[in-house]
Image (cartoon, grey):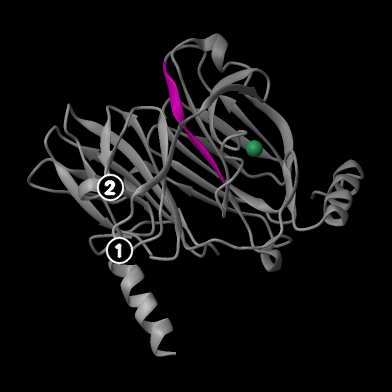
Amino acid sequence: MTSALNKAVSQAEVSRRPVAVLRGLPASDGAGVKLTRVIGQPKLPDLDPFLMLDEFGSDKGADYIGGFPDHPHRGFETVTYMLAGRMRHGDNQGNVGLLRPGSVQWMTAGRGIVHSEMPEQEEGLMQGFQLWVNLPAKDKMCQPRYQDIDPEKIPVVERADGIRVKVLAGSFDGVTGPVSAVATEPLYLDIVLPKGAALEVAVPAEHNAFAYPFEGNARIGAGAEARKVSRGEIAVLSLGGTVRFAAEDGPARLILVAGRPLREPVAKYGPFVMNTADEIRQAIADYQAGRFV
Ligand code: FE
């Protein structure tokens, strides 16, 4: 027992380092929306509890105008963080919402919804992320739930040195984000570092975590284990209680995301993510029979 306790204490003191750094792949989804698949690609099929991370960003209407017409989800959560542009969301249960710049939609699909995500603009920049977060077996068939969070509801920690941290989920510096009651206890931060700034962030020690610079480059990790991670590369982080970021060659902006791993079997078929093949067959049968209501 003593050694287990010692291990937990030391783990929390360890600074995380990148254990893998890789680039997303160009992909297309929905009705021809161009995006970059960062998690959910051959080199990084998943990172428990995260099943997928897509970055979208284009100022050409043709790259996004088709949107994501009606499609189902069961067994996990989709998280959309808009940076620029507007998307209209609607589902088969009458829920509607508008995603606008800076807003977050944390959707718990649970036992099933059929929804559409369509651009509400024909031109101009559309930019953001969609993350898929798995649900534990006990929650996969829960009632669907939406957390539609307006930009004004997302706290920002601003420091004198120009560092800005938006807390979408989890806590930073005693400030807690608005997303609640998510089984994987996620941390989701949007971090802006001016050139020359460095920041150490506390991360729950047993969570899996990644960082993704989407403007500029960041040096990630502490001391000799630090690595330069360029814009558009994902750094999968080792376990540990903190992670250090530095912007050296210019300003940088990145997302840091962490979640408690579920360590459950994953049976995945397109928009259905369950624990067993039987549950996938059931999901397909339920969807085809119109039971996602
Ligand atoms: Fe969807």
Give amino acid for label 2: Glu
Q: Which of these two is toward me, 16 or 158?
A: 16
Measured in 3D between alpha carbons, the distance from the residue under mark 1 to the one under mark 2, in whole angstroms, is 12 Å
Q: Secondary structure at mark 2?
A: helix
Image point (69%, 68%), residue name: 138
Above or below, 263 relative to 49: below
Query: Mark 2 sits on what residue?
Result: 225
Sequence-wise first label, 1 or 2: 1
The reply to whether the magenta stretch includes residue 127 is yes
Mark 1 packing: few (<14 Cα in 10 Å), some, or many (20+)?
Answer: some
Q: Which of these two is toward me, 110 or 233?
A: 233
Query: Mark 1 sits on what residue?
Result: 14
> In which quarter of the view is residue 35 placed?
top right
Q: Which disc, if any, is residue 66? A: none
Position in image of residue 246 (x %, y %)? 20, 41
> In which quarter of the view is residue 110 placed?
bottom right
Give amino acid for label 1: Val
Q: Secondary structure at mark 1?
A: loop
Image point (35%, 81%), residue name: 6
Residue at far left of view: 160
Image point (43%, 33%), residue name: 100
Image point (35%, 62%), residue name: 240
User: Nearer the viewer's eye, disc 1 or disc 2?
Assistant: 2
Q: Which residues are magenta?
A: 125-132
Residue at far bottom of view: 1
Contact between marks 1 and 2 (CB within 8 A): the answer is: no
Position in image of residue 281 (x %, y %)? 88, 49
